[in-house]
Amino acid sequence: MDTVFFVGILGLALVKATPIAFGAMSGLMCERSGVINIAIEGMMLMGAMMAFLGSVAFDNLTGGGLPPTASLIFGLISAMLGAGLIALLHAVLSIHYKVDQIISGTVINLLAIGITNFVANAYIDPNGIAGVGVFPVISIPILSKIPFIGPIFFDHAPLVYLMLIMVALLQYALFKTPWGLRTRAVGEHPRAADTVGINVNRRRYINVTLGGLLAGLGGAFLVLESVGRFQKLMTNGRGFIALAALIFGKWTSVGALGSALLFGLSEALGVRLQLGDINELQALVLLIGLGLLLLALAFAALKLIRRGADKRSNRKIGVIAFAGLAMIAAALFVNWPPIDIPVQFLGLLPYVATVLVLAGFVGRAIPPAAIGRPYEKA
Amino acid sequence: MSEPVIRLSGVSKHFPGVLANDKVDFELAAGEIHALLGENGAGKTTLMNVVYGLYAQDEGKIYINGREVEIDDPNDALAQGIGMVHQHFMLVPVMTVTENLMLGHETTRGPRLGLLADLDEKKVAEEVKQLGEVHGLAINPDALVQDLSVGAQQRVEIVKALYRGADVLILDEPTAVLTPQEAEELFRVMRSLIAEGKSIIFITHKLKEVLEIADRITVLRDGKVAGITTPSETNESELAAMMVGREVILQVEKGPPHPGEPVLRVEDLQVKDLREQMVVRGVSFEVRAGEILGIAGVQGNGQAQLVEAITGLAPVEDGNVFVDGKDITNLKPRAVTESGIAHVPEDRHKHGLVLGYPIDENLMLQTYYLPPFSKRTFIQPKAVRENAETLVKEYDVRTPSISTLAGSLSGGNQQKVIVARELSRDIRLLIANQPTRGLDVGSIEYIHSRIVAKRDEGVGVLLVSSELDEIMGLADRIAVIYAGEILAMMPASEATKERLGLLMAGVQEEPAEN
């Protein structure tokens, strides 16, 4: 297996991780403020449809007089508004009417499926509406020329970059700004926040709605950067994977990105498996190896940031990193025998491996203490 | 005389079905410690929550330094220089001290981005240290609140109020969670704050503390002001009478014990809590028939798990429990009950009663499956009713009827229902965990007398309490538990508040000569 191939898989993993990371950040916004969000899937689906409709409508209205990118940007805004609107519905149901948040989330998911299927059946499919296309890849000058790193990180369409920027911004905002402090307080101990004059429900409303905008971006990515058109149920469970990434990432955006990358990697390997580029065992070993390496990097970074507060030993991190590298090397240089298992099962394996790596090494994630409970003023 | 810092005039507050404050007048003079004394449910906390803006009053006016003010939320109160330390701390456990202090009132640096500006934790930590040094409130600004002891968390709360510029501090039952030594320390801090020109409202139901620290005392009863006095003009029994509305016997009346054979023997007991931490570490003791063994300790030192393990509610890791010489280790709760143990649990709402059941059904919960309550698998409504009517009368449960839901009774009456159910059975051992927590003086008096009566009938009593007055008043022998171990065992006659307090704080005594 050559480097080009390896780099290709990693770059594809980042692309595949993008909608998942957007979805996870959407969940992060809600759940850190104490509102469970199992409706990421529905919000993304809504965002995807609105991205499509918005970009097509804008294109028709302007009669193609503007460059397609303008239509795509309008689609992006439509996606955020559409998803933001049903996020607002989730907020009204679960904050104002104190509906059980799981039920509210389920309602949103069903509603989104219903609306999008209806619009697709009644309008998009019969009229054979075609999309405006996708955002072009923007190769960042100089950076994209760095060997290995460049093609993986700096040779993508704009939403991938936006996702990376948002992850960093959100991580910073959550832990280093008054907004983050208040958000976390509202999710952990809303009464304490109330007693220092923070309006708990207003904070939650704002966060849930902003979270909807992020989920909209995740949905928009599928249409505007991946497929170029809207298909029924095209989110295909990514919203729920995003929720899992959020939890494995311990309710931080950087952690969620790490988990999303692993899920993205599974997806990328799945694509390659179908193309027959690599062998099944090889893919599994590669996935687990990369997962371990990623974890070791995350642990090391955490240790550097927290200086001393982190109990993980250098040795443990070293062992994980070494095991990861060894498995990657093995995947690349050993000739793996083909195995004979049903192809459906193969599609499942990368996900199982991801869950095993994450569950095995990340440890228990503790959710925000007040999550799921509507705030009652005594 | 200058204007009072806070003056309340005719403040009333209704909750559905309850008049929590009824035209209350209250004054806090500058530089005084004003105790707000009353039983649970007298309306003390409600009144102060009105002042702090958590509730809006239905009637009445609030004056700060002579000016009438509207306090709609805690921000208004903070702006008027009023800070409150709540009984249940308002701190976020997973955040650092610094983060908690600046929450809602953040200090930032760099570009002015409003809510998205950069938090300046270093500067706040510096200020916190300085504030702490002035008043002897040592706290580590970088520690996570969840790692701090209860006493330290309380210091954080006080510093939090001061950091926000409070001139008036409202302390809601601040000593309830402290050892006697920690309470003394708190009083020292309070005096230091007064010397700095602050004023303090001190909410409590403990008479001794009021007499020790307060300059003035306002007593609330049933939401009304029952009297205003000063420590020099009054004494404990007068205050108690004001709180309850009748004469109260504060001292438990009891004769000397007549201990018989051991009924409970606990040998080297080890118990883990839900987080798999060993919280009872090799505890051994005996309770004899006809004596009360008191277990003193600050809450959270393994008492809860000790009681749960004996009563079969939690698994025993190692060691044995014998009742009348019979091994009951790890038996099911029903078998434990049948071996002659009565249990008055710590949390009467969660473990003592089914709040959604009427009183008569609650009164047969432990033995509903036995005659006379059940015959041939059917419940016998007549027996249930008769049992309830007898017990309600005998134990003085104040209720409109026996079919009233347990959840709608007052705390004192709920506890009487539990005590009635447990003591009316034929028992060998009574385990009472915090039997009078949160009760009014009248109910406390009654329940104490019942426990003593049971002892005199020859029942062994294991009393667990974090109230030293209760332990010292009731117990014949006293054990002190700290971090899951019994540090000392002594006859009640040798116990003093100071000695118990030190042991409760984990200070080992010099080993005696033997």
Image (tube, rainbow, N blue to C red):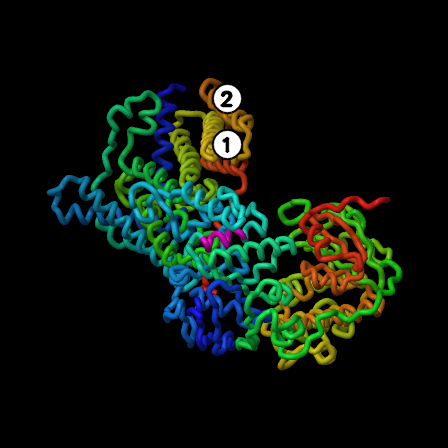
Q: Earlier in the sequence, mark 1 or mark 2?
A: 2
What residue type is disc 1 on?
Ile
- Nearer to us in this view, B494 or B375: B494
Range of residues picked out in magenta: B155-162
Q: Where does residue B5 sit, x and y in percent of width and height? A: 43, 66
Which of label 1 and label 2 is nearer to you? 2
Give the residue number, with chain letter if any, for mark 2: A326
Q: Please, is residue A63 above or below residue B478 in the view? A: above
Judge by depth and name the residue closer to the eye, B90 or A329.
Answer: B90
Residue B408 part of the magenta segment: no
Q: Which residue is mark 1?
A: A341
Tell me which amino acid carries mark 2.
Ala
Horizontal side of B14 relative to B370 (left or right) equals: left
Whole-percent x and y of residue B188? 57, 55
Marks 1 and 2 sit apart, C-alpha to C-alpha, by 26 Å
Q: Secondary structure at mark 2?
A: helix
Residue B490 in view here? yes
